[in-house]
Image: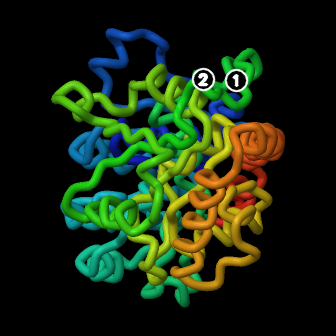
Amino acid sequence: MDNIIIFIGYPNQIPIGLGLFGKENLEYKSKFDAYTFDNSTSQIYHHPKLNCVIQFYMSIPDFLNEKDEYINGFNKSLIFIETLNNYTAILHKLKNIHNHKKCFIWHYAEVFNREFIEKINRIGYDFILSGSKRPELESDSIFYLDLLLPFRYFRYYIGYYWLESLLSNLELPKYDKSKPKLFSYIRAHRDSSWRTEFLESINGITNTMELKNSANDAYDLLYPKYKHFEAINDYVYCNFNLIFETLYYYNNTETFITEKTFKGLFFGKPIILVASMDILNYLKDKGFYLLNFEFIKSINNSDDVTTSIQNFIDWLNTETEEVIEKKYNEFLDKSKNNRKILFEYLNDYSQSETIFQKLLNN
């Protein structure tokens, strides 16, 4: 008898499900028809290796309306309860579901707030897979941390799965003297205001940099994940790229990595990253190449992060164009390997399969 893994919510859960198991490893069992899809309440896949049905319900009411007999017809069920705002009805339904485990995947890479932690404790999960380091949960044996987990989600959610076949045909340009030495997206508002303060603290950075706000009007704000050609142009056809992570880099309590870093690694151009020391060292230990470590021997505290970038800017402002061009092309050759490492991770599903096999068999 098959087991079943249940996700609730199409927009976020289908990308994370495909990211965990690989679209190519799943058999699509629902009817492949646009009209049928638009009028359906669930989508069904089958994972042959796990001998498991993977079912996505469009919404919480759709899951609640499912017959208990259907779910109980499986040997075991893993129920992913991601919503922390309307979980009581789900818990009530689960009282009638045999051999189930309550699971949680935090794939956004955003921070848990205190209210989330309290709700997680009340729900009583059997397993938590998180892309965000949380000190409050790390000591719990049910908590599994994978800081690269959000990359699996971004691969599908922002549509980069469809760009992958393009990469082999996309020759990465060498240093371009007609362009600014340094490019960066910058959105500084509310919690991101620290980015502007950071730029103001780096001497000489304005002499080298082209700044671009990645959202300028209503269209940009509403459809950011579909702006692929803008991303290709900005990430590929620039020289050095300064990337700001979401979280203030002096925050060493919480750790997560977002689509900003994912895109930089995905396109394989030289990047220098403004992120916490833990993120920088973690990526370095994974084999990713970051320019930060070309301009400082080691990063042991938050001030070292600033120093690495100040040293880089000083180098850009003092070296000749010929030296910068030569070194850039050397850095480019090293950066290309970031893409290889990224796809080795994305295409290795053994970790997910081991985790879920254990959950289903125990």
Determine which quarter of the picture holds residue 36.
top left
Left or right, 103 with reference to 269 = left
Mark 1 packing: few (<14 Cα in 10 Å), some, or many (20+)? few
The numbered mark at residue 309 is: none
* Residue 148 relative to residue 253: left or right: right
Q: Are marks 2 and 1 in contact (CB under 8 Å)?
A: yes
Please tell me which residue lies in front, 272 or 109: 272
In this rendering, does residue 145 appear at all?
no
Q: Residue 34's image quarter?
A: top left
Residue 141 drawn at (x, y percent) = 58, 84
User: Disc 2 designates what residue?
Assistant: 163
Task: Provide residue 153's location: percent of width, then percent of height.
Answer: 51, 45
Mark 2 falls on what kind of element? loop
Q: Residue furthest left?
A: 218
Q: Is residue 301 above or below residue 200?
A: below
- The secondary structure type at the circle numbered 1 is helix
Viewport quadrant of the C terminus: bottom right
CA separation, marks 2 and 1?
Answer: 7 Å
The spot of residue 126 in percent (x, y) is 49, 74
| Residue at image mark 1 | 167
Crowd tier of the residue under label 2, counting other residues whose Cα lies within 10 Å: few below 14, some 14–19, many 20 or above:
few
Residue at x 57% of width, y 32% of height: 238
Q: Nearer the viewer, mark 2 or mark 1?
A: 1
- Relative depth, front residue between 286 and 43: 286
Residue drawn at (43%, 87%), measured in percent from left and top?
A: 136
Residue type pointed to by label 1: Leu
Q: Kindly identify the residue that appears in the image at 33 percent across and 33 percent down.
A: 224
Type of amino acid at the residue the image marks with label 2: Leu
Residue 264 seen: yes
Q: Is residue 84 left or right of residue 281?
A: left
> Where's residue 325, x and y in %?
74, 37
